[in-house]
Amino acid sequence: MPRPSPTSLIRVPDPVSSATLFLVVGPSGAGKDSLLEAARAACPEVRFPKREITRPAGSGGEDHIPITEPEFERREAAGAYVLSWRAHDLGYGVPVGILDDLAAGRSVVVNVSRGVIDIARGLNFRVRVLSIRVPSAVLAERLRRRGRESEDQIAGRVARADSFRVTGPDVVEILNDGALETATRRFSSIISSESSGH
């Protein structure tokens, strides 16, 4: 379950209207990492911070900052993360330093759990939630190709994905069921245009 950092330990700078905190959410297998990689190249003016994760380096998946479980718990308690949560027996933390980027007018894109969206909305910065969606059959096939889970685990992930829906006036849904270029073009376009204050 998501666990917010102690808010009393986090200094939230005054917001700058041109900066946006983009929260990327979606089920495992929806293609978030591919979209983020493309946007990172297309939007050099935007910050894409590495997450701290209690997972060894070189274990596959995203490029992250590996951290031990005790160190994660210590840093979380000390307010080192603006957002933190647990999923699949791992701890995830977004460094509190992104607040300074936002205050300086530099937009930030982070891949997060949907459970921390309301926490992020309370940070007094403009938030845009980019919800990545994919049909069940496509998701199941992607998970099989990835080869990390059994059929039972894939079925469980697909069932959770079917119930995955975030709502609100700040949410934009991006369907990633076709050519990756189509989804990445829309994804990057939203980030680029809203980072410019348009």
Image (cartoon, rainbow, N blue to C red):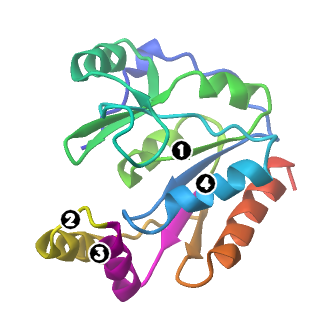
Which numbered dot is residue 121? 1
Amino acid of disc 2 = Glu
Q: Position of residue 28 (x, y in %)?
A: 36, 62
**Image check: 157 left or right of 20?**
left
- Residues 104 and 185: in front is 185
Q: Which-is-in-front pick, marks 4 and 1? A: 4
Indicate the amino acid at tag 1: Arg
Residue 44 horizontal side relative to residue 55, left or right: right
Does residue 53 sit above or below 162 in this rendering? above
- Residue 164: image x %, image y %? 35, 70
Residue at label 4?
36
Q: Residues within 10 Å of mark 4 (few under 14, many from 20)?
A: many
Q: Amino acid at mark 4?
A: Leu
Q: Residues within 10 Å of mark 2 (few under 14, many from 20)?
A: few
Q: Earlier in the sequence, mark 4 or mark 3?
A: 4
Q: CA distance from mark 2 to mark 1?
A: 33 Å
Q: Is 7 on the left or on the right of 87, as rendered?
A: right
Q: Which residue is mark 2?
A: 149
Q: CA distance from mark 4 to mark 1?
A: 21 Å
Q: How far apart are the alpha carbons under marks 3 and 2?
A: 7 Å
Vertical placement of 145 versus 87: above or below? Answer: below
Mark in front: 4 vs 2: 2
Q: Which label belongs to residue 92?
A: none
- Tell me if residue 34 is in the magenta stretch: no
Magenta highlight range: 129-146
Q: Earlier in the sequence, mark 4 or mark 1?
A: 4
Tell me which numbered mark, 3 or 2, is placed earlier along the sequence.
Answer: 3
